[in-house]
Amino acid sequence: MFSDESRFSLQSDSRRTLIWRAPSTRYHQENTIERHRYGGVGRLIWGGIILGSRTDLHVQSVTVTGHIYRDVILEQYVRLFRGAMGAEFLFMDDNASLHRANIVDECLQSEDNTPMDWPAYSPDLNPIEHVWDMLGRRIAALQPPPTGLPVLRRALLDEWCNIPQDQIGNLILSMPRLCTLDLSKFFLEEKLLSDFFSSNRCLPQLPLKLLFSLPFQLALVGPS
């Protein structure tokens, strides 16, 4: 099961604006727009997806703590799928601090829930991120748009159920390809770094933190 949280606000939209732009001008001022990521009041949601099914969507009105995550998410949602699937069940959540709380780890171990090893800061590998994008587009397309939190909550629950299951399944089945692409990108960056320093032997030894920082690698690769 792939699971995650996301936040939807009354000011949210599909977060995509399509424009024509010249090559290498992505970050020019005329091609960018400022957005507040979590502007306005909203609701935090949690969901889980597997091949052929999904959990009910949980809409949370208060801050999620380790105790809430254990007592609500794990006990009321994840446990049902664990019981139905048995030993084949494999659970994925990211490395958020509340997911790694001691009480959460103890609960997972007591239920024989096998957590999937997951690299930190890798939302692009989690297929449910694309499901949040689908959900966001559906909410943004509603006319009239939600004007209050109760209406937003109802819309989120309805549109979550309306997402076709075959689209969710296709996202999960794309995982091997995404992992292959991610590994290819990693080895390409490693090669670029190696080639760069091979051709610049006079450079002083730089700290590893700088070598693998995003701005430094962008400087090597050049603008997209």
Image (cartoon, rainbow, N blue to C red):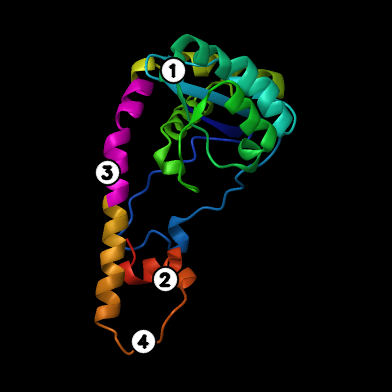
- Write down the quadrant of residue 60 in the picture: top right
Of mark 2 and mark 4, the one earlier in the sequence is 4
Q: Position of residue 43 (x, y in %)?
A: 67, 29
- In what quadrant of the picture does the C terminus appear? bottom left
Mark 2 touching mark 3, by CB under 8 A? no
Can residue 4 be found in the magenta stretch? Answer: no
Instruction: Tell me the residue that label 4 is attached to.
Output: 203
- Which residue in the structure is indicated by mark 2? 211
Q: Give left or right: position of 21 versus 33.
A: left
Task: Provide the secondary structure element on which disc 4 rests.
Answer: loop
Q: Earlier in the sequence, mark 2 or mark 1?
A: 1
Residue reaching furthest to the top: 84
Marks 2 and 4: CB-CB under 8 Å?
A: no
First in sequence: mark 1 vs mark 4: 1
Residue 182 is situated, as x and y percent measured from the top left of the image, at 32, 48
SS class, disc 2: helix
Q: Name the kind of residue labelled 4 in the image.
A: Leu
Closer to the eye: label 3 or 1: 1
The magenta segment is 167-183
